[in-house]
Amino acid sequence: MGTLETLSLAMGVAWTSGLNLYATVAALGLAGSAGMLQLPPGLEILTNPLVIGVACVMYFIEFFADKVPYVDNGWDVLHTFIRVPAGALLAARAIGSMDPTLELAALLAGGTVTLAAHGTKASVRLAANVSPEPFSNWFLSVGEDLAVLGGIWLIFQNPILMLVLVIGFTALAAWLIPKLYRLARQGFRALQARLRGERPAGSVVETPAVTPPV
């Protein structure tokens, strides 16, 4: 792999890990073990059957947890401490032992990209749960899985475009931080109201029909 391809792989897997870590690891591991992708030495561990098996099992669990309102929020909170360091580690291992300085830079940059993707996902999910219907969760979950698969495909087919998209997404996420914070706060308040048994603000209150006097 050239420098540009390696950099695209490092930042690309960091971004997809922020959306769905287990799908990223499973897809790379399966494709690498089948000879469909040529992984760098630092990521060849993903082709280990044990790693693939654990990733597939965890993806199966996340597939369902990610589609249940408010369960997905708890899952995202827990995975703040899993996705971000894992994404940073995958980015660093993609660089490998080329240069310790580059490896450390990839670790820091990868963690930032993963945090941007994870934070955006978690904020949007929390805001989406304000809506009483569950379909938005399903659409968002499926869309994230497709984005992971599409991102992995793009890493190896068009690394320059993938790198541009990751940089653009991270810059956009940084610019949207205040809006994402408001979305997350709105969703958190709705969650608090639901736990207290109150009707979330902004919901429609049905007015009982009044029978006219005879």
Image (cartoon, grey):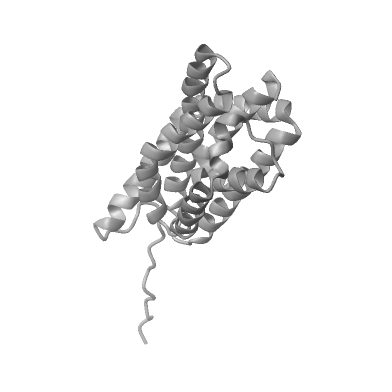
- The residue at 35%/83% (across/down) is 213
Q: Residue 133: image x %, image y %?
A: 48, 62
Near-viewer residue (177 or 151): 151
- The residue at 59%/30% (across/down) is 41
Near-viewer residue (119 or 104): 104
> For the N terminus, which image quadrant?
top right
> For the C terminus, which image quadrant?
bottom left
Q: Residue 178: image x %, image y %?
A: 44, 29
Judged from this view, the residue extending furthest toward the left is: 196
Does residue 211 lie above or below 26 as drawn?
A: below
Does residue 137 lie above or below 177 as drawn?
A: below
Q: Residue 34: image x %, image y %?
A: 68, 48
Relative placement, left or right, of 95 versus 67 is right
The answer, for residue 213, to whether it is visible in the render is yes
Q: Residue 4: image x %, image y %?
A: 69, 21
Judged from this view, the residue extending furthest toward the bottom is: 214
The image quadrant that residue 99 belongs to is: top right
The answer, for residue 11, to whether it is visible in the render is no
- The residue at 55%/30% (across/down) is 42
Does residue 75 lie above or below 98 as drawn?
A: below
Does residue 105 lie above or below 130 as drawn?
A: above
Judged from this view, the residue extending furthest toward the right is: 157
Near-viewer residue (2 or 14): 2
The image quadrant that residue 83 belongs to is: top left
- The residue at 31%/57% (across/down) is 194
Q: How many marks do you count on the picture? A: 0
Relative placement, left or right, of 27 versus 75 is right
Near-viewer residue (188 or 101): 101
